[in-house]
Image (cartoon, grey):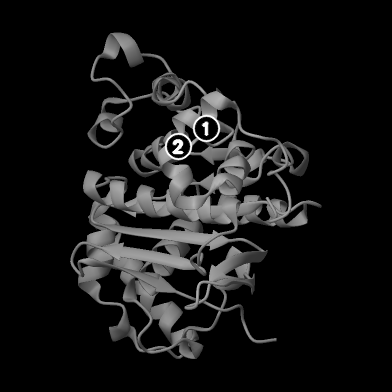
Amino acid sequence: MDGSGGADEELTAQETALYDRQIRVWGVDAQKRLSKAHVLVCGMNGTTIEFCKNIVLAGVGSLSLMDDHIVTEDDLSSNFLIPPDESIYGGKSRAEVCCESLKDFNPMVRVSIEKGDPSLIDGEFLDKFDIVVVSCVSLKTKLFINDNCRKRSKRIAFYTVDCKDSCGEIFVDLQKHSYFKKKPGGETEQQDLTYPSLQEAISTPWKNLPRKTTKLYFAMRVLENYESSEGRSSPGETTLSDAPAILAQRKDMCDRMSFNESQIPTALIERLVAAGKKEHPPVCAILGGILGQEVIKSISCKGDPIKNFFYFDVAEGKGIIEDIPPPAS
């Protein structure tokens, strides 16, 4: 959603009353844009449901959920929208169960289900949305959806989010984004940013990046590269038995890029591998909160957006933003 659209229609009296407190924070125009925005989330896990909860409470126009996987007992550990009663969730997809729960958070938001395989999403389907958030899918599928978003005539903001137990990563592609920033004197000025695609952001030679770049960026690339080479259909399908092969993958990638292997600690790789698909609920809440905030910034065109990776690691106790450029031409 660009900065000029989505704010023409007035809010209803009911919307104004319901969203009064947040309107005082980000203004009527931002709330009007939010109420007209359409969001698609592919992959329902502990992190994306935190995000969904946040934007539903904020008053997004519509939210569509895509995840045909049948709920299992493992989903209960981090997805608080799934009731711990098999008679309720048994035989239902993650999207179905989460959709019913999210409707209760804010009846004014249209929450619906989109059935299908994210790896087969076509461009015309994406035209219905302003924001696309992707999780629980392979790197190949992420790249495919991101590429399709970029090929559409309108700008579609694209995000990926992954939580591996105590660590997490968010990627942001707003393509060409303009927003307004307050200057120290109180005046606002327009800022313009150009984002690389996911393919470009993960193709930058490692030796060209600053030495202070977080080790998580490199470790996540090693892991996803291994999963892709092994044909794993979704992230986290690894166990500690894969660790020797993943460490060999690290050495190969570092050798090819003339990069010091010690910059990607073995202990960090082993933590990510051991995590598998497990998510740590407090980290889910942090990532879902940051992602919700970033999507609201994108829609409202207010505030400095993340460009273009965000990382959180419990061991570090802080979040880190990394601006990873495309490869030099």
For residue 83, which numbered disc appears in the image?
Answer: none
| Element carrying mark 2 | helix
Q: CA distance from mark 1 to mark 2?
A: 6 Å
Task: Determine whether, in the image, residue 31 is placed left or right of residue 163.
Answer: right
For label 1, the crowd category at 10 Å Cα-Cα, with few meaning under 14, some 14 to 19 and many 20 or more, is some
Residue 250 at least partly seen = yes
For disc 2, the marked residue is: 20
List x then y, in percent, for residue 114: 60, 27
List x then y, in percent, for residue 267: 20, 70
User: Can you say whether 201 is above or below 48 in the image?
Assistant: below
User: Can you say whether 237 is above or below 41 in the image?
Assistant: below
For residue 16, which numbered disc appears in the image?
Answer: 1
List x then y, in percent, for residue 85: 24, 14
List x then y, in percent, for residue 18: 45, 29
Residue 109 at least partly seen = no
Where residue 69 sits, quadrant-wise, is: top left
The reply to whether callout 1 and callout 2 are in contact (CB within 8 Å) is yes
Quarter occupied by the C terminus: bottom right
Q: Disc 2 marks which amino acid?
A: Asp
Residue name at image x 34 percent, y 16 percent? 89
Task: Determine whether, in the image, residue 180 is placed left or right of residue 48.
Answer: right
Q: Disc 1 marks which amino acid?
A: Thr
| Element carrying mark 1 | helix
Q: Nearer the viewer, residue 11 or 43?
A: 11
For label 2, the crowd category at 10 Å Cα-Cα, with few meaning under 14, some 14 to 19 and many 20 or more, is some
Residue name at image x 18 percent, y 66 percent? 315
